[in-house]
Image (cartoon, rainbow, N blue to C red):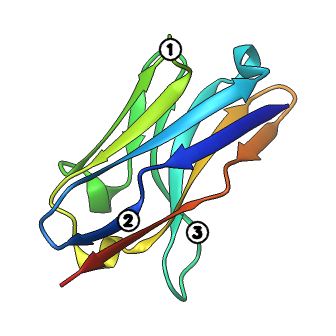
Amino acid sequence: QVQLVESGGGLVQAGGSLRLSCAASGSIFSVNFMGWYRQGPGKQRELVATITSGGSTVYADSVKGRFTISRDNAKNTVYLQMNILKPEDTAVYSCAAGIFSPPSRYWGQGTQVTVSS
């Protein structure tokens, strides 16, 4: 089992920045990748960014150049630095931890990010 706790959401004006944090605990040695997903109003959940245990990253096209995912292994924490925020970034952002074998996915409780125009 892996437990995830997110923090850092809030209300920000367009063009502003926020940093989300996701602290992991439990069987984190088995985690192969961690990532951030989001679900906007009336939309399906979508991938924002992922980072593997080796540090490889993947970003959604919509956030490339604006968002940066990183990890602090000593703190078992993954971050999502969000810059140049747009109203369309408004969503509930959830942290996820993935294990390849056996295939497993763990989710945090989610944190609201609201970008005003």
- Determine the residue positioned at 50% across, 14% down: 73
Where is residue 27 shown, x and y percent of the image? 79, 20
> Which residue is labeled 2 in the image?
10
* Tag 1 and tag 2, C-beta contact below 8 Å: no
Circle nearer the N terminus (1, 3):
3
100 displayed left or right of 81:
right
Which three-letter amino acid code belongs to the residue tagged 2? Gly
Mark 2 or 3: in front is 2
Where is residue 40 shown, x and y percent of the image? 48, 77
Dividing the picture into quarters, in which one does residue 16 lie?
bottom left
30, above or below 70, in the image = above
Q: Nearer the viewer, residue 35 or 112?
A: 112
Circle nearer the N terminus (2, 3):
2
> Which residue is labeled 3 in the image?
45
62 displayed left or right of 95:
left
> Which residue is labeled 1 in the image?
73
Q: Nearer the viewer, residue 37 or 110?
A: 110
Say what secondary structure mark 1 lies in: loop
Where is residue 23 shown, x and y percent of the image? 57, 33
Which three-letter amino acid code belongs to the residue tagged 3? Arg
